[in-house]
Amino acid sequence: MITERIFGEIKGISIPEVTIHNKAGMEVSILSYGATIRSVIVPTADGKKIDVCLGYDTIEEYMTNGGFFGASVGRFANRIKGAAFDLDGKHYTLAANEAPNHLHGGIQGWSKKIWNYTTDPDHNSVTFVVKSADMEEGYPGEVTASAKFTVTEDNRMVIEYSAVTDKATPINMTNHWYINLNGHASGDIMDHTLQLNAEGITETDDKLIPTGKILPVEGTPYDFRTPKAIRTDFDAVRVLPTSGYDNNFALGNPGEFKQAAVLKGDKSGLTMTAYTNMEGMQLYTGNHINDRKGKANAEYHNMSGLCMEPHHYPDCVHKPEFPSAIVRPGETYYHHTEFKFEG
């Protein structure tokens, strides 16, 4: 079942919230602003319903607060060094919105656009569509991108991003929702248990730009191949430029759909298993969630939620040794991620 309501408005334009329900009681709500996930309500084994997604109650809060809460980000998720790149003999300059680098599509990236949408009640899905003009934010090519959200009867939230272009351009989409399996208002995620099926991480400089090297996780604080609590090795990464975990984990096998991670809430008993066809996943432990009010007057602070963002490797436009994010006319970018909830 799909329901809709008006969540707010921007300059006289209504911003709908579309909610997808399944028979088990799971509900996912998405805003047309930024194709933003506002809530993910999951039923527990004992009959409770827990909203595991951090968010806000007004459109104004989404527009003014930092952190990309729940947003679909593009044209290029994560960072591009020097806010510029060369492609087919031409130089392109982007917005340095995380100076001196480019982050999550720039000053007016896709996370800040109002997307059109269509619902498909027969398949319990909604598809949001956005157009990006040639040279918007400095990127070549007119791009039409879509974000399809589906809720299945076995409590999966399926996200499918796709895009086509009329000129060669980098495309790298992901969703930046913040997860707390104990509930969005329950405190920090430090005692969540995480298993992440990655043998390596992309080494970065002090601005979080990859050097081009893949470092093995074995024997380091980044080894989540065996489940462990987030806090286990957190002190070892707290003092780094990331102030915690903010790293791209190398899943490998680009285009192959595989299990990427398993996250478990320590209080709720909820388990979330992530699957994706992307070769990288950014783990961000909410190290810079400054004190703020969330939904229903919830208090959010650093580490109130974590992000698991499947995507192409950051700055791959400068790293020929990384899988490419370049999409050309006649090709279709396709990103498929699923989050399955149990417990």
Image: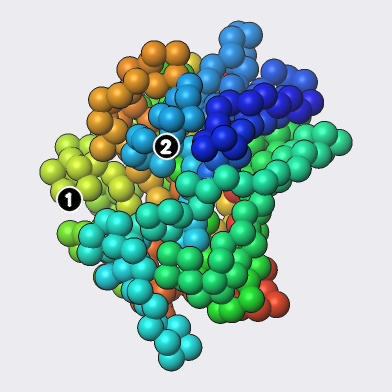
The residue indicated by pointer 1 is: 241
* Foreground disc of the pair 1, 2: 2
Tell me the CA gap for discs 1 and 2: 27 Å
Residue behind mark 2: 63
Q: How would you rate the neighbour count of disc 1 (Cα within 10 Å): few for under 14, some for 14-19, many for 20 or more?
A: some
Up/down of 324 relative to 201, above or below: below
Q: Is residue 19 visible?
A: no
Residue found farthest to the right: 122
Q: Nearer the viewer, residue 137 or 99?
A: 137
Q: Quadrant of residue 69?
A: top left
Amino acid at the residue labelled 1: Pro
Checking the image for residue 104, the label placed there is: none
Whole-percent x, y for residue 14 in the image = 61, 33
> In this rendering, would 208 be left or right of 296?
left
Residue type, numbered disc 2: Met
Residue name at image x 39 percent, y 13 percent: 297
Q: Quick one: quadrant of the C terminus?
A: top right
The quarter of the displayed image where residue 114 is located: top right
| Quarter that holds the N terminus | top right
